[in-house]
Image (cartoon, rainbow, N blue to C red):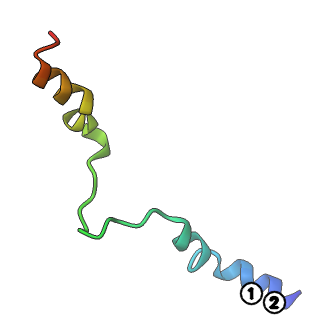
Amino acid sequence: MAYLEASYLNLPDTTFKDLRRKPPVTRTLFPWQNTIQFSLTKDINKELGIGK
């Protein structure tokens, strides 16, 4: 039972950290709040002259 309690105490430091998304190798974060600027559809439409 003590082993189980110790495992639960270590969850935040080990297991949960491993479950988090790791940053890319370049160490740059993706701006999730501004994803429209990276829209593939927007780029394709611009190249083909389609759109608004």
User: Circle 1 — which element?
Assistant: helix
Instruction: Report the Cα–Cα distance between label 2 and label 1.
Output: 5 Å
Residue 23 placement (x, y as % from top left): 35, 65
Residue 41 placement (x, y as % from top left): 26, 27
The answer to which of 46 and 16 lies nearer the viewer is 46
Furthest-front residue in this view: 48
- In the rendered structure, are the residues bearing label 2 and label 1 in contact, judged by CB atoms less than 8 Å apart? yes
For badge 2, the amino acid type reads Tyr
Residue at 32 percent of width and 65 percent of height:
24
The answer to which of 44 and 22 lies nearer the viewer is 44
Look at the picture and state if 28 lies above or below 4.
above
Look at the picture and state if 36 lies above or below 23.
above
Residue at 55 percent of width and 66 percent of height:
19
Residue at 27 percent of width and 38 percent of height:
35
Residue 17 placement (x, y as % from top left): 52, 72
For badge 1, the amino acid type reads Ala
Mark sitting on residue 3: 2
Q: If the image is split into quadrants, where does the N terminus sit?
A: bottom right
Furthest-bottom residue in this view: 2
Residue at 13 percent of width and 19 percent of height:
48
The residue singled out by tag 1 in the image is: 6
Look at the picture and state if 23 lies above or below 32.
below
